[in-house]
Amino acid sequence: MAQATKAVKKKVKVNPVFIWQGTNKEGRRLKGEESAASINEVKAILRRRSINPIKVKKKPKDLFAARKPAIKPSDIAVFSRMLATMMSAGVPLMQSMQIIGEGHENASMQDMILAIKGDVESGTSLAESLGKFPLYFDDLFISLVHAGEQSGTLETLLHEIAAYKEKTEALKAKIKKALVYPTAIIVVAFVVTAILMIFVIPQFEALFTGFGADLPGLTKAVISLSQVFQEYWWIIFGSIIGAVYAIMEGKRRSRKVQHFFDRMLLKIPVIGIIQKKGAIARFARTFSTMFKAGVPMVEAMVSVAGATGNIVFSDATMVMRDDVSTGTQLNVAMKETHIFPNMVVQMVAIGEESGSLDAMLAKVADFFEQEVDDAVDNMTALMEPMIMVVLGGLIGTLVIAMYLPIFKLGAVV
């Protein structure tokens, strides 16, 4: 099946569009557009239409043209559910894809679904057609569709895929919420501080210049910090933006950098717990779905590793895969990684002994998905008063620093 998955993941070459001008047999000038691999191919097409090509050039990109909306993972989840539902209702695959494609609100999804439909109509398997769009259909999706086509259980496996996509997208949304919330607080606090330092504090500084008296230490410190912001604001903002960009690029390009940050993320209080539980939930959900579909354990673990969302768990899964391929039991391999809770290891052991590993893994996924949900809700409830404390303390300190000289002057008078 792994070979089948690799075989179906081909790159689709999109031909450029050319603008042409020419004359027909009667000498009448014609013009139009044609999609082809090269100018010579366009000329050959025109000659077959009895048109003498005069001028052919590549169509320039329209910078002001309306861009088609991006395809989101939620669109793929909805597509999976709709296709599964329609096939369960007895609608043939081609007709189902035609209805879904024409009725989809996302124009990009329409084009992709109809392209897949056309590919299948020409004799290509559904798994192979989906593999031509690797950005939207991962190895797990293609493997399950391929298994369904081979075993004649495509309709059943489409329901499994739909349920898997819906649950994983819901989990991703919860974890994203857990990460976005504290980040938003930090950004807001920094922006508010920068605005006060650059625009507000200088007004007070000009006022204090005419006092002719020593300023309190807190006021001097705030004014000095304000002067730094005024003079080097572009370096401060540039450094922060550059650091964020460097971290993102480093994670994308270097496995060592990604491993470092993913490991550090797991150690952050509260957020690390949510990340770990989310990774375990994705591990269990993906493993359960593939094992239930009849994908061999060793083969399934490749897709499971990629679905965990954290390179620490991904590397651990690949180590487990190597151990399992040599005859080690899954629960023993999991225990040796030292990253899975004892409860998960025990449930996997029970599943292996009773022959119900997929059901046990599904229960583990349900449990940890609920744990993530509760943890995010608790964190949100704690963060709301924390926002008030942080922002209130920050702005309050700056206000006190600016009004201390005024209070001091009033006491002297």
Image: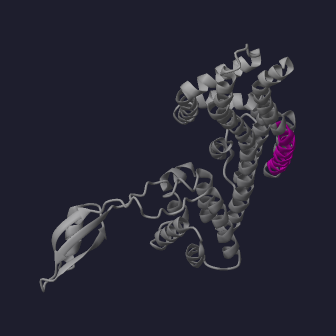
Give yes or no for residue 78 being in the magenta stretch: no
Assign the magenta stretch its main secondary structure.
helix
- Location of residue 402 (image quadrant): top right
Residue 216 relative to residue 69: left or right: right
How many discs appear?
0
Residue that appears at 56% across and 34% down = 241
Residue extending furthest bottom? 26
Residue that appears at 58% across and 30% down = 240
Residue extending furthest top? 214
In the rendered image, residue 403, in percent from the top left (x then y), is placed at: 78, 27
Judging depth in this view, the residue of 357 and 241 nearest the camera is 241
In the rendered image, residue 317, in percent from the top left (x then y), is placed at: 68, 36
In the rendered image, residue 68, in percent from the top left (x then y), is placed at: 50, 63
Magenta range is 360-386
Is there any visible trace of residue 209 in the rendered image? yes
Residue that appears at 57% across and 59% down = 71
Judging depth in this view, the residue of 396 and 104 nearest the camera is 396
Judging depth in this view, the residue of 312 and 413 nearest the camera is 413
Q: Is the residue 143 above or below the residue 267 in the image?
A: below
In the rendered image, residue 124, in percent from the top left (x then y), is placed at: 48, 67
Give yes or no for residue 362 being in the magenta stretch: yes
Quarter of the image where the C terminus is located: top right
Residue 4 relative to residue 351: left or right: left
Q: Is the residue 284 above or below the residue 401 in the image?
A: below
